[in-house]
Image (tube, rainbow, N blue to C red):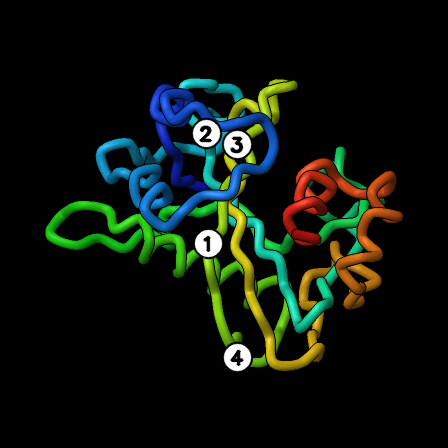
């Protein structure tokens, strides 16, 4: 059965005039981005090649103090282009099971939190986060895959560095000082390397 995903209209995303790569956003800008009238649901199989929409993907950066969780993706992960790459982002697509509605309209921020909770629980186990905050988005347009995805960057601050990896596609989890991320950039997936400047700010 085809997975049903949550998307934003690409015309809406383009009208926001976001930079390529990571854009830090204020809470007000995030609310404007997730306008309920611009949210769509559709089958993943069709959306993979339909550039009228951008599939929403949670990209959770797990932090503790001055450290950031990193890991590598193995061939067991779904995206072959990311195999072997270092990542600072945990998560995945928002799907129809994450959707939360109020008075018949999709509540995007509640849906985001559901997607965040589900993806984090599926991929890693952690202690209860001290703080969870949406900080921006990643928009890339350089290839066909990039043009149908939009990364929603979420910071998750933990009280400790205890994590348990549930996803067999993720290996070598470790917390790294944020100042050491730059020397790892050549081996990172592009979404992660694009966050280094923000994480060091």
Q: Which residue is mark 3?
A: 149
Quadrant for residue 62, please give it: bottom right
User: Residue 100 appears at what percent x and percent y?
Assistant: 27, 55
Q: Which residue is tagged 2? A: 54
Q: Residue at x 37, y 44 (%)?
A: 30
Residue 151 place in picture, x, y as percent: 53, 40
Disc 4 from disc 3: Cα separation: 29 Å
Crowding near the residue tagged with mark 2, few <14, some 14–19, many ≥20 C-alpha atoms within 10 Å: many
Element type at mark 3: strand
Whole-number angstrom distance, CA of label 4 to CA of label 2: 30 Å
What count of labels does the image hold? 4
Vertically, is 112 above or below 80?
A: below
* Residue closer to the observer: 79 or 148: 148
In the rendered view, would you say 199 is above or below 167?
above
Q: CA distance from mark 1 to mark 2?
A: 18 Å
Does residue 159 appear to the left or right of 53 in the view shown?
right
* N-terminal-most mark, 1 or 2: 2
Residue tagged 1: 134
């Amino acid at each position: 059965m085809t997975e049903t995903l949550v998307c934003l209209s690409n015309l809406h995303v383009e009208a926001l005039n976001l930079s390529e790569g990571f854009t830090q956003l204020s809470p007000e800008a995030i609310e404007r981005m997730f306008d309920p009238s611009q949210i769509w649901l559709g089958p993943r199989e069709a959306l993979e090649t339909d550039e009228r929409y951008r599939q929403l993907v949670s990209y959770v950066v797990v932090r503790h103090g001055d450290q950031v969780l990193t890991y590598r993706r193995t061939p067991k992960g779904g995206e072959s282009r990311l195999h072997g790459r270092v990542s600072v982002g945990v998560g995945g697509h928002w799907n129809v099971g994450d959707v939360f509605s109020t008075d018949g309209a999709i509540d995007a921020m509640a849906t985001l939190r559901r997607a965040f909770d589900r993806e984090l629980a599926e991929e890693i186990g952690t202690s209860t986060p001290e703080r969870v905050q949406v900080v921006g988005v990643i928009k890339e347009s350089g290839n066909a895959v990039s043009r149908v995805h939009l990364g929603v960057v979420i910071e998750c601050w933990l009280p400790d560095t205890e994590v348990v990896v549930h996803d067999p596609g993720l290996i070598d989890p470790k917390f790294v000082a944020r100042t050491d991320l730059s020397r790892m950039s050549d081996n990172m997936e592009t979404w992660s390397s694009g966050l280094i400047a923000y994480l060091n700010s």
